Image (cartoon, rainbow, N blue to C red):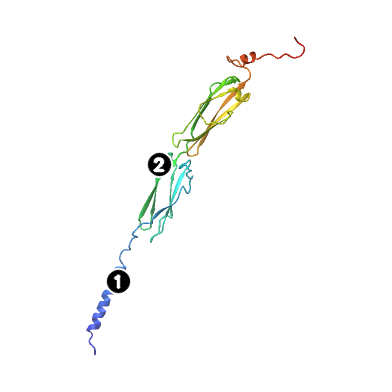
Amino acid sequence: MPPRAPRTALLLALGLLVGLGSAFGHSQPVRAATAGAVSVWGANGNGTPANANGWTNGSNALVWACSKNRSGPVEPTVTKTVSTDGANQSATGTCEDQAGNSASDTQTGIDVDTTRPTVVLRVDAARYTVDQTVRVTCHASDALSGVAATTLTGVPSAMTCQGATVAAYQFALGASELRATAADNAGNMSSASAAVVVDVIGDAPGGGDDLLRSQPVRRTGGLP
């Protein structure tokens, strides 16, 4: 009958291996080594896109996509909204996975301006005669994104919103409306208006009465 010693040694070795495997099999689960990577899915994705000047005049929503890893993200996307007026603002999105890991990304240079520019328009008198000069005061300002463009309509020739002098005879007789419009770099617009009334004759010194009296009188018919 062959000796039993080698067989016994083999059985003892196998038992030791099984015991070690059981011990490792019941150890604590391994946590994911890294959090889900953070990537910008679309800045302004759910809000008002920035214009060519880099400004937006509404809520600016930034959306981050949380990529999958071994444990999976808690939420597939993270959204932050910037709606406060200001230049060079920032927002941070943070993704978490099911194992409790996290990763963040910060977007900067967010410019929001929801306030309209200020426009001031006035003329130096309420009524004019055709020989007088209409002095126009026009000014536009914007404290945040700045004024991008201005126009002044109702004058004989189009011009920007700025101080100007226009001969009254260039306006049509009666009432005319001047309108100044300004747009800021975020796309906000505002306007102001002023009325100009031009008469042929008037009471102003050197005005229409003097002009009318200075013209020769044309006689008709058989009167001497």
Where in the figure is residue 115, as x and y percent of width and height?
A: 47, 36
Give the quarter of the image for residue 36: bottom left
Using residue 107 as the reference point, say whether residue 27 is left or right of it.
Answer: left
Q: Position of residue 41 (x, y in %)?
A: 44, 52
**Residue type of the residue flagged with mark 2:** Asn
Relative vertical location of residue 70 with respect to residue 54 in this rendering, above or below: below
Q: Specify the quadrant of the image occupied by residue 96.
A: bottom left
Along the line of sight, the residue nearer the viewer: 81 or 136: 136
Q: Which mark is residue 56?
A: none
Question: In front: 169, or 4?
Answer: 169
Pick the quarter of the image with the N terminus: bottom left
| Residue 119 % position (x, y) | 50, 30
Tag 1: amino acid: Gly
How many marks the image carries: the answer is 2
Image coords of residue 23 (percent x, y): 28, 69
| Secondary structure under the numbered disc 2 in the rendered image | strand
Specify which label sits upstream in the sequence, 1 or 2: 1
Return the residue at label 1: 21
Q: Relative to 119, does residue 5 appear above or below in the rendering? A: below
Spot the residue most to the bottom. Answer: 1
User: What residue is shown with label 2?
Assistant: 88
- Tag 1: Cα neighbours inside 10 Å, few (<14), some, or many (≥20)? few
Answer with left or right where residue 131 lies relative to residue 183.
right
Q: Residue at x 58, y 20 (%)?
A: 127
Judged from the image, the secondary structure of the residue bearing numbered disc 1 is helix
